Amino acid sequence: MKTLVIVNNPKNWALQIPGVELISAKSYLADPQYSSLKNARVFNLCRSYRYQTTGYYVSLLAMARGHKPLPNVLTIQDLKSPTMVRFVSDELDMLIQKSLKTIQSDRFTLSIYFGRNIAKRYDRLCHQLFSQFQAPLLRAQFVKNEKWNMQSIGPIAASDIPEEHHSFMVEKAKEYFKRRRNYISRKEATRFDLAILINPEEKFPPSNERALQKFTKAAEALDFYVERITKEDYGRLAEFDALFIRETTNVNHHTYRFSRKAAVEGLVVIDDPESILRCTNKVYLAELLERHKIAAPKTKIVSEENQQRIPNEIGLPCILKQPDSSFSQGVVKADTPEELEQALKTLFAKSDLLIAQEFIPTDFDWRVGILNHKPLYVCKYFMARKHWQIYERSKTGRTYEGKAETLSVEEAPAEVIKTALKAANLIGDGLYGVDLKQVNGKVHVIEVNDNPSIDSGIEDGVLKDDLYREIMTEILRRIEQQKGIRRDTVESSRSST
């Protein structure tokens, strides 16, 4: 991939970096050799990114040409958005307070050159802001009332860089491009780049370490470069062709922002943002299943105004759920009116709406894994010993889990598969795990998960490595479809090499 640095006037830039071409914005916009260039990384260092300026058009046309600009137009818009600035300030609050605690005044300006500042003590903050707002040269303004808040952040024109900072900026630019060149050289032998989003600190991740290794192996066999990324890599999404999220998702969470940005950037993404929105809120799911007449346990959307109707309309015992509950957390069983009253009080402190469901005791739940309207695997998840859920969390903090049994799709009851597909198809064409209960031959949908567990030794019990290969092949198919690459052309080119 060719690396281009675009500036207003190359004569004002002392950047002599091997493997990096320094050109003027006018040349990039007008010279046919750049408009026909197939693959390029574009670093836009123009004086301004304001709407319809030259700098704005450099990033806009780079995206239209299939190049990868930094900053892209989405970042340019984010830099102008007070809402986005406030969101990032809140997310980085602890780091901001720690980094600026020794500042004596109530205002502070932080200059960020390729993710660095002259004062090394601000490196972590600079790195995080550079990750969130991927522009090479940034300036952030902070104000202090009761605590420090970021007031604004925007690009720095080269002419606005203080003379005493200039050599430092050039040095950091050279270091950055050297790292980029080494990084790209590791990728250039592969066809496509896949990012797998994980959280190394997560207690109950959707995939265990062995499964992540198998996903990587399956992807590499299909000619992917694979890299695990974390929430700190938000600004790097444009480097990849696809994003596979293997961290528990939620709407008010960085996983949703990753998914949304990946979709806007044109990446193939699983889980897609629409699926996260639809699956992670059980209020939405309850309404959706009822509207389409898909059997589910007797369900009621509960507010503080109608909570007194639960015993008569749902009965006791009943199950109460937070709208965004996952992995049995935020899910409570109330056996008595007293337990119901206490549980409602606790859960209403977190959400204005709750879900109340009738309690249907079974020895196990069905789980059907579905990808692009096709069932992949079927599991029986048995309840934890002497407990009503698959997971039991003791007062000491220990977690106990029921056993699991994996079946082939053909072995599972036809009605379970049919109902699971019907429910998943209402969500989209992503990767889903549909949980169901079967009582006296009737199948009830409990929920649809956008981020289903796929652990080595459990969900892959029947398909083994083929399960990982199926999922990675679907990601590859979507990339090729998006890029207009015909499968028969790809296969013939592979067979001829």
Image (cartoon, helix red, strand yellow):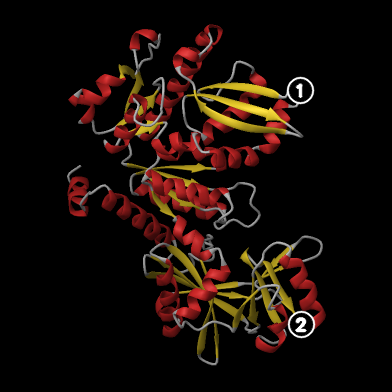
Mark 2 or mark 1, whichever is nearer to me = 1
Identify residue for label 1. Answer: 102
For the image, the number of numbered tags is 2
The residue type indicated by label 2 comes to Asp
Horizontal side of residue 7 vs 289, given as left or right: left
Residue 3, above or below 160: below
The residue type indicated by label 1 comes to Thr
Quarter of the picture containing the N terminus is: top left
Quadrant of res 89: top right
Identify residue for label 2. Answer: 335
- The spot of residue 239 in percent (x, y) is 40, 37
Is residue 220 among the parts visible in the rendering? yes
Element type at marker 1?
loop
Separation of residues labelled 2 and 1 (CA atoms): 54 Å
Horizontal side of residue 81 vs 59, given as left or right: right
Q: Nearer the viewer, residue 249 or 137?
A: 137
Horizontal side of residue 294 vs 209, given as left or right: left
- The spot of residue 356 in percent (x, y) is 65, 77
- Considering only order in the chain, which callout, 1 or 2, is on the residue closer to the N terminus? 1
Element type at marker 2?
loop
Residue 336, above or below 204: below
Is residue 447 among the parts visible in the rendering? no
Q: Residue at x 42, y 58 (%)?
A: 468
- The spot of residue 287 in percent (x, y) is 52, 75
Residue 233, above or below 490: above
Quarter of the picture containing the C terminus is: top left
Which circle marks residue 394 in the picture? none
Horizontal side of residue 108 vs 411, given as left or right: right
Residues at discs 2 and 1 in contact (Cβ within 8 Å): no
Q: Residue at x 34, y 56 (%)?
A: 473
Residue 139, above or below 391: above
